[in-house]
Image (cartoon, grey):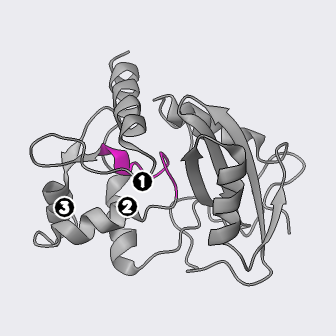
Amino acid sequence: MHPISAKGELSARATTVGFAETNRVAAGETVFYTIVPCALGFVLVAMTSRGVHRVVLGDAVEVLEATLRGALDAAELVRDDAALGDISASIVALASGAALSHVLPLDLCGTAFQQRVWRELQRIPRGETITYAELAARIGSPKAVRAVGTACGSNPVAVVVPCHRVVRADGSLGGYAWGLERKARLLRSERRTAEE
């Protein structure tokens, strides 16, 4: 089943807000994807019938496709640039620092702890940052600072779940799976557009 109808609407099976209840992509399940240029290089957007499953930033289309195939080796991957055009345009806007104008359905695989972290990340306002310790306290696990950092690093949907908004206690950037230069550019863009 294609996740997007001919009108560009999500299928009835897709969740309309937040996280889907499934934990993994089933063997043979179809995952549609697209790769488009953005302010941070290229962005790969992959979607199941339940919602956006992966958003990956990179410099080369071939590397992004190989990364997706490695992560979802049991899935049937189908590139469909046209059907995912509106969703990828929203994510390209996010990569430029813009606010999301609507809720994107998400289908994220993660432990209960990771999902708590990812939900809390979505509450950090655009243009602002918090520390890993503050994030740990917000989810009710103030001693789990390292685990929070690991959950941020495991975030499968760059820019959509804004793990880039978390910094070290000294204000330095910390880590970012898609590169510290991208994290710095994204934070600058978000601050600029939040002030407009």
Q: Which of these two is toward me, 127 or 71? A: 71
Q: CA distance from mark 2 to mark 1?
A: 6 Å
Magenta residues span: 157-165
Q: Secondary structure at mark 2?
A: helix
The numbered mark, 2 or 3, whose residue comes first in the sequence reads 3
Q: CA distance from mark 1 to mark 3?
A: 22 Å
The three-letter code of the residue at mark 2 reads: Gly
Residue with the most extreme right position: 6
Quarter occupied by the N terminus:
bottom right
Dot 1 crowding, Cα within 10 Å, few <14, some 14–19, many 20+ = some
Contact check, label 1 and label 3, Cβ < 8 Å: no
Q: Which residue is mark 1?
A: 177
Taking the spot 52% from the left edge, 37% from the top edge, the residue there is 100
Q: CA distance from mark 2 to mark 3?
A: 18 Å
Dot 3 crowding, Cα within 10 Å, few <14, some 14–19, many 20+ = some
Compared to 172, does 77 lie above or below? below
Taking the spot 74% from the left edge, 84% from the top edge, the residue there is 27
The numbered mark, 1 or 3, whose residue comes first in the sequence reads 3
**Foreground label between 1 and 3:** 1
The three-letter code of the residue at mark 3 reads: Arg
Contact check, label 2 and label 1, Cβ < 8 Å: yes
Q: Which residue is mark 2?
A: 153
The three-letter code of the residue at mark 1 reads: Ala
Q: Secondary structure at mark 1?
A: loop
Q: Which residue is mark 3?
A: 138
Q: Which of these two is toward me, 60 or 135? A: 60
Specify whether 78 is left or right of 65: right
Q: Residue 10 in magenta? A: no
